[in-house]
Amino acid sequence: MKIISVVGARPNFMKVAPLCRELAKHPEVEHVLVHTGQHYDLRMSDAFFVDLGIPAPDIHLNIGSGTHAEQVGRTMIEFEKVVKAEKPDWIVVIGDVNATCACSIVAKKEHVKLAHVEAGLRSGDMGMPEEVNRLVTDRLADLLLAPDRISCANLKAEGVADSRIVFVGNIMIDTLESQREKAASRDVGELVRRELLEAREIPDLPDNGFAVMTMHRPSNVDQIETLKPLVDFLTGEVSRDMPLLWPIHPRARKQLELFGLWDQVRRNIILLNPLGYHDMLRLNMGARVMLTDSGGLQEECCVLGTPCLTLRWNTERPVTLREHGGASVLVGNDVGKIRATYRETLSTQRTPQRPELWDGRTAGRIVESILNA
Ligand code: UD1
């Protein structure tokens, strides 16, 4: 059996690592790993392959940056050639990035069976490109591999036949569990000094004595009316309470520079390069509070128990919310709400939580489901 799996952007890489390891245990499977190249920087891409022991991609499409239509269009054109030449039995796509959606369409038009890892997540927010990618991919997939029971229920409510849905758990937690020890052994001060965006003095950073943030979504960084009050709160309040660390995504930096906020940010927040997997996990393990608009970090905070302010009005990952036992609270981008929850969170204890089947063995269930489908 020949399986092509596709990755494109940073959040895909930590999810494909356990899948590659599991597929390698099956000599009857020929596995072809395709990287579309949506993320291409050393720090956004290559470092994850090295750190997580992901084999070098067999095929690289070099799509690069562009508008959504440009990325999806270019990926489809190049991936169609790959599918025609390789003639796989299955194509496995992961998550909700542009590569996921583009390769799903190609798979079905080439009559190849399609499996979606992380099926059924729904934010209900069609303003997010990721939601469009999720809906298209799940509508096309033959095998929908869901990370939690809420996602299974979403798919059923949309009319997906039970026979196509398999509840497998969250593959990202396979990576977290296999890398936890290595991450824990890192020294926070050492890694922060190594990854500083620009040389500066840094204070002591004992566990529980610093905050970590990430923010890159268009809904937070693309309008100055939204971004400026957020920056004022982060620089004027959070960074006054404790050192605030921000491994900064390239698109967030671009927007801060565009809106003239860069100086205010770099003076008050400890800016870091985009971090490798172990460094980010280590910071999450020690953070007193996480402020983020990333989906993956919400899940990691849930399992590590890090109190998490999710800078969004909705989430496709409700299982990570406090009302479901998780560590995250939706605070949107209204500073009044963020401030109130932030103050309250400072007295919250770290409480690790493990949703059903987030047990580190999801990749095995995924491969078994595909082989038996
Ligand atoms: C993508 C995903 C998003 C995920 C995020 C994590 C989609 C629709 N979105 O968003 O779900 O949370 O990745 O990182 O697929 N850039 C670089 N170097 C790179 C890659 C990008 O400098 O290696 C810059 C480019 O200038 C680009 C911008 O970052 O214009 C945004 O990259 P893009 O791939 O369009 O989407 P993300 O915003 O990263």
Image (cartoon, rainbow, N blue to C red):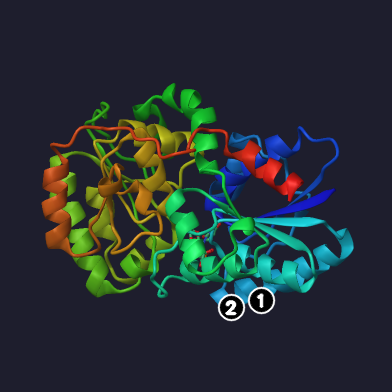
Number of numbered discs present? 2
In the rendered structure, the answer to whether residue 85 lies left or right of residue 113 reads right
Crowd tier of the residue under label 2, counting other residues whose Cα lies within 10 Å: few below 14, some 14–19, many 20 or above: few
Q: Secondary structure at mark 2?
A: helix
Q: To which quarter of the image does residue 104 belong?
A: bottom right
Crowd tier of the residue under label 1, counting other residues whose Cα lies within 10 Å: few below 14, some 14–19, many 20 or above: some
- Give whichever of 202, 239 is nearer the camera: 239
- Give whichever of 176, 120 is nearer the camera: 120
What residue is at 80 percent from the left and 69 percent from the top? 111
Real-space CA distance between mark 2 and mark 1, rounded to the nearest whole angstrom:
6 Å
Q: Position of residue 243 (x, y in %)?
A: 22, 39
* Residue 61 visible, this orientation: yes
Mark 2 near ligand 1 (CB under 8 Å)? no
Which mark identifies residue 275? none
* Residue 8 visible, this orientation: no
Q: Position of residue 119 (x, y in %)?
A: 54, 57
Which residue is identified by label 1? Answer: 73
Q: Secondary structure at mark 1?
A: helix
Please determine whether, in this image, residue 280 is positioned above or below residue 125.
above
What residue is at 68 percent from the left and 73 percent from the top? 74
Identify the amino acid type marked 2.
Answer: Ala
Q: To which quarter of the image does residue 161 belong?
A: bottom right
Identify the amino acid type marked 1.
Answer: Gly
Mark 1 near ligand 1 (CB under 8 Å)? no
Which residue is identified by label 2? Answer: 69
